[in-house]
Amino acid sequence: MTAAGPPREELLARYRALVLDELPRRARAGRWVVTADHCFGRIVLDHAVGGRWYDALDRRRSPAFTQLDDDRLAAAVALAERIAAEGDPLLRRLDAQSLAWRGKPAKA
């Protein structure tokens, strides 16, 4: 169990379910700005580490989210849950920041 939350295995499973299935499925149905699972992973990981995830995590070790410490993993899951609850408006803001960290413009 993490210091103040569910066991790490539960957090990892919930991250996978949200980022690889639930968010992309809901995004396609709702025509959100982002629909691909790898884009959700980029956005959630970037915000978990406060910048480009590959500057904080080893991009050669896959999957990257398993490298997050317990606190960052819990924060990543909480953010993914928040995206699920709030949808496209929140996702647009998070995606714009993620792209800005990469020196890319926000999507229209």
Image (cartoon, rainbow, N blue to C red):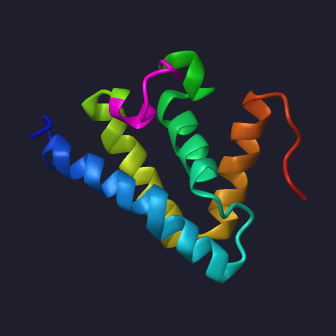
Q: On the image, which quarter does residue 62 sit in?
A: top left
Classify residue 22 as left or right of residue 39.
left
- Tell me, yes or no, whether the highlighted magenta stretch contains residue 62: yes
- Residue 99: percent from the left, percent from the top? 76, 38
Classify residue 61 as left or right of residue 35.
left
- Residue 87: percent from the left, percent from the top? 59, 70
* Residue drawn at x 57%, y 56% as measured from the top left: 37
Q: On the image, which quarter does residue 9 sit in?
A: top left
- Residue 55: percent from the left, percent from the top? 58, 17
* Residue drawn at x 46%, y 69% as measured from the top left: 22
Classify residue 29 as left or right of residue 19.
right
Q: Nearer the viewer, residue 62 or 14?
A: 62
- Tell me, yes or no, whether the highlighted magenta stretch contains residue 50: no
The residue sitting at the bottom extreme is: 29
Would you place residue 104 above or below residue 12 in this image? above
Would you place residue 34 above or below residue 45 in this image? below
The residue sitting at the left extreme is: 1
* Residue drawn at x 15%, y 41% as measured from the top left: 4
* Residue drawn at x 65%, y 75% as measured from the top left: 28
Q: On the image, which quarter does residue 34 sit in?
A: bottom right
